[in-house]
Image: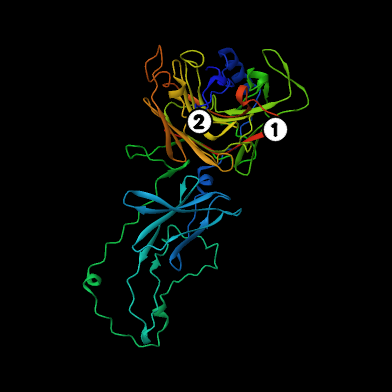
Amino acid sequence: MGNPSTLRPDSPPRRPRRHWRPTPLVVGAVIAVALGLGVVPDQVQPTAAERRAARPTISLPIQQGVRLAFAGRVRPRAAARLQVRRATGWKDVARDRASRRGQYVVTTVLPSRTRSYRVVADGRASVVRKLTVAPAAAPAPGGADVAPPAAVPTPASPASPAEPDPRPDLPTPDVPAAEQRPEEPAQEPAEKSPEEAAPAEPAEEAEPAAPSDDCGERPQKSDDTYWSCTFVDEFDGSTLDGAKWMPQQTWFSGMVGGDAGCYVSNPETISVGGGVLRLTSRRNLPPFTCVSPYGSFASRATVATVATRSRFTQVYGRFEARMRVPAERGIAGSHAAFWLYPQEHTYGVWPASGEIDVAEWFSARPANVYPSVHYEGEVPLLSSGGTCAIPTASSAFHTYAVEWTPTVMRFYYDDKLCFSHRWTPTRQTPPQPFDQPFYLVLTQVWGAAWNAPVAAMPDSSTLEVDWVRAWQ
């Protein structure tokens, strides 16, 4: 892996070794303990109907002068993105952060033609609202220029009733002003100009919402087909789902994190609540003995990792997590990651069997989040992405994904491609070693070497995970 201290300042950082790489003997012991002694109890999984219940709602459009407003509900504090249908697909035009009750209001410029709108939040899309543009009205009697609304909302279909508008104080001009004066005599319509007499542009067909499944709205592949959900955890419960995740624990794996960090599983290191998984590393604790099958040792630090090992594995597909990395940006010491690791060391010990780092963050270099592909014979400057800038990674949730195919790894941050890599391993033929099932890993540890904790680093650091999804 090289000496991290010798890297150029602009090169992707090389993290200290902290990965879970158990020997076959240890793996057997882990599985036996987990299954025989019930280390991680199974939890009741949410039903598909419960997961779909979080689909965003969107009201009928409301005119506010020269602007158009939509209101509705999404997950509390989630980002609601208003999208308009264009010839090339759906395009974001506005966004709003929902309130603690999940209410949002998004506005956009009043269109001059019929448009279809929807709201997307947490990868889920609302029903489509079609805005029909009304023809220009004749001048009002008496010479007063009373302009009717430029658009009239299309009523909601019986199959998808709209939720009551959570912002009722917004004006809703359902009836044109000219229609509110029945006592005044109707006037002869003015003669239309050739431009006005031309046939109206055909109304745009309402685009059906993108297909969805247990993972929410299904991402589209390059061949215009859609990915299918194979794994999802929204962390909606109050404890970690043992049917999906296995906590890393030093007492049975012998692994340590960072500089003598002891992997433990307790509410102070691994917790679930409010729809978020929290992994916390702690330091400067009273001295304690960290038990390990390879020899116990004294420690003052605990770290946290959870993995889908022996619970969910997959070869090829799309893997994605929505996370907010720790707040201690610019202070050396904290290290967070979302990564994939092989279920079996088919081609030998690390790095011969491969590793995929979807998103790796170092508090000493907080402006970027780093994707990497590790294998035998890799060239570090080519196999790691050093230009994936996420300056708000510590203050906001972002989505980190990899699309893994037999020939290339493509990394998307907030749905934007930021790095891709084609591997050429030594002593192997592609797609080796990335032709075997890998499992998912979430990690929060203390750093080492150039990212080792300094005095200014707080005694705890937390990675927050909103959800994890996989498709194939």
Q: Is residue 8 left or right of residue 256?
A: left
Give residue 261's position: percent from left, percent from top: 67, 23
Q: Nearer the viewer, residue 110 or 158?
A: 110
**Dot placed on the residue nearer the N-terminal end, 1 or 2:** 2
Amino acid type, residue under disc 1 in the picture = Ala
In the image as oriented, which residue stretches furthest toward the front? 9
Give the labeled residue for mark 2.
370
Q: Position of residue 134 (x, y in %)?
A: 34, 69
Residue 234, position in %: x, y? 55, 40
Residue at 72% across, 16% down = 297
Please, what secondary structure does the residue beneath circle 1 have?
loop
Of the pair 409 and 152, the residue shown nearer to us: 409
- 317 and 445: which is toward the camera: 445
Badges 1 and 2: C-beta atoms under 8 Å apart?
Answer: no
Where disc 2 sits, the SS reads: strand
Give the CA distance from mark 1 to mark 2: 24 Å
> Which quadrant is the C terminus positioned in?
top left
The label number, if any, that marks residue 456 in the structure image: 1
The answer to whether 86 is drawn above or below residue 137 in the figure is above
Q: Is residue 16 left or right of residue 85?
A: right
Hey, which residue is sitting farthest right in the picture? 286
Q: Quadrant of residue 433?
A: top left
Name the side, left or right, on which 434 lies relative to 324: left
Mark 2 is on which residue type?
Tyr
- 211 or 190: nearer the eye? 190
Whether residue 126 is visible: no
